[in-house]
Amino acid sequence: MTKYCVSEILCLIFLYLCSREDYRYKTLSVHKFLIFGCLGLVYVLTVDIVSVQSMAAGAGIGGVMLLFSRCGLNWLGEGDGWMFVVTGLLLGIRQNLAILCIALFLSGIYCLVGMLLKKYQKTDCVALAPFVLAAEVVRLYLI
């Protein structure tokens, strides 16, 4: 097992737990962010697979999402921002940005099809975390 695999496995476990909770309850609890954030930070810094600048920039993506959610925009939850902070710490900026783009693309297609089939309205909320998990699986498959 290479040193990259451990951070990918940590990320997949974290995203699975987040997506399960987000799908069921439409909320994300804090303890997962603390546990996986600390585990990932310690592992990545000791094994030195991602530079500190890349980790900081990757977590910055989540920070910007947190800023948007705190500004009162209802289209983005605070848990989604914290989820991207943790994935940014684990994977770095390039992978985190790739996951974000793929997840937004997948969720956009899902919502568009749901609206065309009259399953969703414009004001309905859809959990983002399952799409982030799917985006990570797609990203790993494309590597």
Image: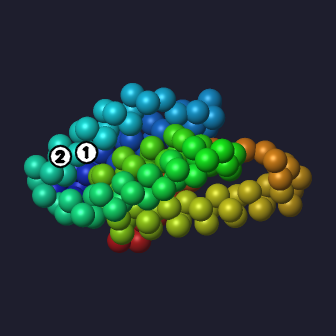
Q: Residues within 10 Å of mark 1 (few under 14, many from 20)?
A: many
Q: In the rendering, which numbered label is found on residue 40?
A: 1
**Please, which residue is most extreme toward the right here?**
118
Q: Secondary structure at mark 2?
A: helix
Query: Which residue was labeled with disc 2?
Result: 43
Tell me, yes or no, if residue 91 can be seen here: no
Q: In the rendering, which numbered label is found on residue 2?
A: none
Name above or below for residue 34 compared with residue 103: above
**Please, which residue is most extreme toward the bottom here?**
142
Q: What is the quadrant of the C terminus in the image?
A: bottom left
Residue 54 percent coordinates (x, y): 27, 64
Tell me, yes or no, if residue 125 can be seen here: yes
Q: Is residue 49 left or right of residue 136?
A: left
Give whichever of 103, 92 is nearer the camera. Answer: 92
Q: Secondary structure at mark 1?
A: helix
Residue 128 percent coordinates (x, y): 59, 49
Q: Measuring 44% from the left and 66% from the top, which residue is drawn there?
A: 97
Give whichever of 3, 42 is nearer the camera. Answer: 42
What's under tag 1, amino acid-wise?
Gly
Name above or below for residue 33 compared with residue 69: above
Residue 58 percent coordinates (x, y): 36, 59
How far apart, in angstroms, are the residues tagged by discs 2 and 1? 5 Å
Circles 2 and 1, Cβ within 8 Å, touching? The answer is yes
What's under tag 2, amino acid-wise?
Tyr
Q: Is residue 1 left or right of residue 18?
A: left
Q: Measuring 31% from the left and 33% from the top, which residue is drawn there?
A: 35
Q: Residues within 10 Å of mark 2 (few under 14, many from 20)?
A: some
Q: Measuring 11% from the left and 53% from the top, which residue is drawn there?
A: 47
Q: Is residue 111 left or right of residue 47?
A: right
Q: What is the quadrant of the N terminus in the image?
A: bottom left
